[in-house]
Structure formats: structure tokens, C-alpha cells
């Protein structure tokens, strides 16, 4: 779950999910608070992409707005798969046939590339890495991009595969190859949370040619 989402927001999203969709008036009734308080909460959650609004027309009267939790918001609840993922990864690593292990890893890599890269079409690295950052954030990652004249970096503030990486560091290399394929450049994994760093950082350094030689 996202550490930036306050408990009061989680409670609000849970209440809205229980209603499936609701108007401001319905939310006021269920929450027992004022219209202004509801609108303020909705504005913040919509800006963060956790809530969406639709317009519903009923007869000749004025249309009304209904609100519902987005898929991004729903991912904040009930998706703690880390233990299951760790067990599955362990079972894959214990497969004796190297060809089978390689095939599974290849298919997993293709799936992740398609998941994170299918909408990335930037014409240069600067644009692509910003698109990748947005895609990862949509999936709940906490990440940032730093662009310098000869170096760009993508930093994950919280490792999405920490439990897996503790068991098997190869998951880090898998994520690295996925990002390399999407961005079209080689990357160096310079920091890893599993090694005690505060973040995971992928860097690409542009090699410069010495024109004096």
C-alpha cells in the first residue's frame, strides 16, 4: 500500500467502495460530514487518481455527478501478494531443468515489458523515462527521475520486490533488463534497498567521445 495515503483517505475510499458509486449527498449521509468536507476529500483523491467522477442524467432534471474508486484506488486494498510471490519465485528457482527455468524467466520478462512499456513511445530517452515514471506511479510505485547532462536515473523509493530480493537477487536483474528494454539503453543498478540503501536506483551514463584524440 502507498505510504503517502493517509488512514482517513483509506477509510473514505473503503466507504466509497462499499457503496460502489455515490453522489456527494449520499457520501454526506454515509460519512456524517458536511458537503464541503466531502468535496474537499474528493478533489484530493481525484487529483491523485484514486477516485473518478461520472455524469448521470436522469429524465429532464439536472444531471448529477457520481463518484467511484478507480482501479488505482482499488489496488490500495487487498493486494498483499508478497508472501505468495516469494513462494512462487522459490519454486521456479528450484526447477532442475535450466531450459524450463530460462523459458519461465523469459515469459515473465515479456509480460512485465508489455505491462509497463506498451504505452511508452517517446522519441528520446528523456521522454521515455518520464513516461516510464508515470506508468510506474500509476501502478503504485514511489519513484522519481533525475536528469543531468550526461546521466539519467530512475529511483524507486521503496523496492517493489524486497521480499523476493532477500531470497534471490536475480529479481533485481530481471527488473533491470525490463527497464533496459523499455528505455532502449543499458542501465546500471547502483543502489538496492536489499543492500541497505534507502532506495533502488537505475542509472544510464552517456559516454562522451574525446574529440582531441
Image (cartoon, rainbow, N blue to C red):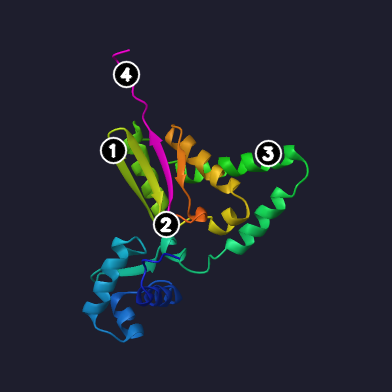
Q: Secondary structure at mark 1?
A: strand
Residue ID for mark 3: 102
Whether 151 is drawn above or below 201: the answer is above
| Residues at marks 3 and 2, CA–CA distance in whole angstroms | 31 Å
In the image, is residue 213 above or below residue 14? above
In the rendered structure, does residue 206 fall within the stretch colored magenta?
A: yes
Do labels 4 and 2 touch, CB within 8 Å? no
Along the polypeptide, which appears first: circle 1 or circle 4? 1
* Region rendered in magenta: 199-213
Helix or strand or loop: what does disc 4 sit on? Answer: loop
- C-beta proximity under 8 Å, tags 1 and 4: no
Q: Label 2 belongs to which residue? A: 198
Q: Earlier in the sequence, mark 3 or mark 4?
A: 3
Residue at 57 percent across and 59 percent down: it is 163
Side of 197 where 124 appears, left or right: left
Q: Residues within 10 Å of mark 3 (few under 14, many from 20)?
A: few
Amino acid at each position: 500500500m502507498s505510504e503517502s495515503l493517509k488512514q482517513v483517505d483509506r477509510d473514505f475510499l473503503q466507504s466509497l467502495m462499499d457503496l460502489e458509486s455515490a453522489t456527494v449527498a449520499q457520501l454526506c449521509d454515509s460519512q456524517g460530514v458536511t458537503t464541503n468536507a466531502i468535496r474537499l476529500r474528493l478533489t484530493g483523491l481525484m487529483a491523485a487518481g484514486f477516485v473518478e467522477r461520472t455524469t448521470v442524467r436522469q429524465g429532464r432534471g439536472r444531471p448529477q455527478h457520481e463518484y467511484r474508486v478507480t482501479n488505482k484506488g482499488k489496488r490500495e486494498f487487498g493486494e498483499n501478494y508478497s508472501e505468495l510471490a516469494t513462494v512462487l519465485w522459490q519454486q521456479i528457482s528450484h526447477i532442475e531443468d535450466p531450459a524450463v527455468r530460462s523459458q519461465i524467466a523469459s515469459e515473465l520478462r515479456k509480460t512485465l515489458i508489455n505491462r509497463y512499456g506498451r504505452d511508452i513511445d517517446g522519441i528520446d530517452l528523456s521522454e521515455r523515462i518520464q513516461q516510464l515514471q508515470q506508468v510506474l506511479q500509476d501502478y503504485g510505485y514511489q519513484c522519481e527521475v533525475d536528469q543531468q547532462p550526461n546521466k539519467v536515473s530512475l529511483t524507486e523509493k521503496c523496492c517493489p520486490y524486497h521480499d523476493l530480493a532477500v531470497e534471490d537477487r536475480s529479481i533485481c536483474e530481471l527488473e533491470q533488463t525490463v527497464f533496459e528494454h523499455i528505455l532502449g539503453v543499458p542501465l546500471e543498478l547502483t543502489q538496492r534497498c536489499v543492500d541497505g540503501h534507502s532506495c533502488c536506483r537505475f542509472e544510464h551514463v552517456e559516454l562522451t567521445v574525446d574529440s582531441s584524440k
